[in-house]
């Protein structure tokens, strides 16, 4: 038997094999479909096992190990499937993001340090709490060229990826360098998210943690940027408001302060992301 024929037969068996579960683990199985002389030779070398009447064979550990060497030896472009894998992220790895509501002056922003193991749905609700959004509207992340959001609300069959299934650690630094979070597709509030740094979580401090920021988000349902600026004008003109401003002030109530930013209250609310998810999901039940 020509060694090259035997080697190429084993290589093809390996490349067309699949993993089959057996008690205690799994084995690689492949359909025979190759010269019997080559198959017999491979069985003699204990690279394969399987009955004469069987239509398939199993690769032994020895056979699979040798086949992997043959992949490199006989490699021709496209024969070897190269799978890119990301380095495993430590449970203690963290990211620091600056998050800012776009198209608003003066700036409304937050700085957030968060574990890399955080899921996107958890991050979404952390953002809502940090800025003071009510959470009664849909939201969506755009990272790279893909959209991630509330899959159960995707009524139109788009390519939206379920945010519950994705962790920050699954993205490379390039993708997280700058991405976007949209909230309320009617008013269209866009949040620009920039990666400031990555590192290791410090000590036993609770994470996530907001470490900086300024000003409160606009009120929900205020009518996008133009409506927000009308509210700011009405608040400045409380002493002598126009009729339109009076109506706005009545609608707004007494609890809204555009300059409010209480980092201690924010951190008390975001310290348990899983509980946050349950709370906000209950709003849409």
Image (spheres, helix red, strand yellow):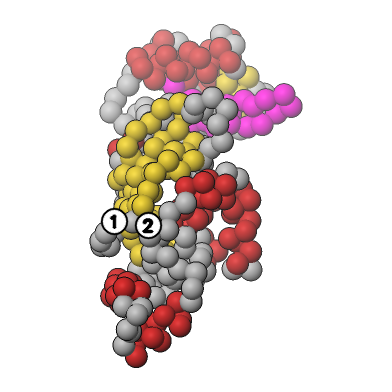
Q: Is 20 situated left or right of 188 in this image? A: right
Measured from the top left, where is residue 210 in percent x and y? 45, 43
**SS of the residue at dot 1?**
loop
Question: Which of these two is toward me, 138 or 223?
Answer: 223
Could you tell me which quadrant the N terminus lies in?
top left
Tell me if residue 269 comes above or below residue 69 in the rendering. Answer: below
What residue is at 60 percent from the left and 61 percent from the top? 281
Taking depth in this image into account, of 93 and 54 the one nearest to the observer is 93
Marks 1/2 in contact by CB < 8 Å: the verdict is yes
Q: Quadrant of residue 29?
A: top right
User: Which span of residues is magenta-colored?
Assistant: 11-32
For the point 30% across and 41% down, the residue is: 177
Q: Looking at the picture, how far across and down is residue 76, in whole percent?
A: 29, 25
On residue 107, which mark appears?
A: 1
Choose top left, top right, bottom left or bottom right for residue 147. bottom left
User: Is-magenta flag for residue 14?
Assistant: yes
Q: Is residue 227 visible?
A: no
């Amino acid at each position: 038997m020509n060694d090259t024929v035997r080697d190429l037969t084993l290589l093809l068996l390996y490349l067309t094999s699949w993993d089959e579960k057996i008690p205690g683990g799994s084995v690689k199985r492949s359909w025979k479909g190759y010269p019997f002389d080559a198959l017999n030779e491979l069985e003699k070398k204990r690279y394969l096992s399987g009955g004469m009447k069987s239509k398939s064979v199993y690769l032994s550990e020895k056979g699979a190990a040798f086949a992997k060497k043959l992949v490199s030896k006989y490699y021709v472009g496209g024969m070897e499937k190269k799978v890119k894998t990301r380095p495993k992220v430590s449970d203690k790895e963290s990211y620091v993001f600056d998050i800012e509501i776009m198209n608003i002056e003066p700036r409304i922003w937050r700085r957030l340090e968060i574990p890399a193991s955080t899921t996107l749905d958890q991050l979404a609700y952390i953002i809502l709490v940090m800025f003071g959004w009510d959470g009664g509207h849909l939201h969506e992340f755009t990272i790279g060229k893909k959209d991630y959001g509330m899959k159960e609300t995707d009524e139109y069959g788009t390519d939206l990826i379920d945010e519950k299934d994705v962790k920050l650690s699954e993205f490379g630094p390039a993708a997280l360098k700058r991405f976007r979070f949209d909230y309320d597709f009617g008013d269209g509030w866009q949040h620009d998210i920039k990666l400031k740094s990555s590192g290791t979580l410090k000590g036993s401090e609770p994470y996530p943690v907001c470490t900086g920021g300024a000003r409160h988000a606009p009120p929900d349902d205020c009518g996008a940027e133009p409506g927000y600026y009308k509210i700011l004008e009405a608040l400045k003109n409380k002493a002598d408001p126009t009729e339109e401003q009076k109506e706005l002030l009545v609608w707004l109530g007494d609890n809204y302060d555009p300059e409010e930013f209480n980092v201690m209250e924010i951190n008390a609310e975001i310290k348990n992301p899983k509980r946050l998810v349950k709370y906000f999901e209950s709003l849409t039940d």
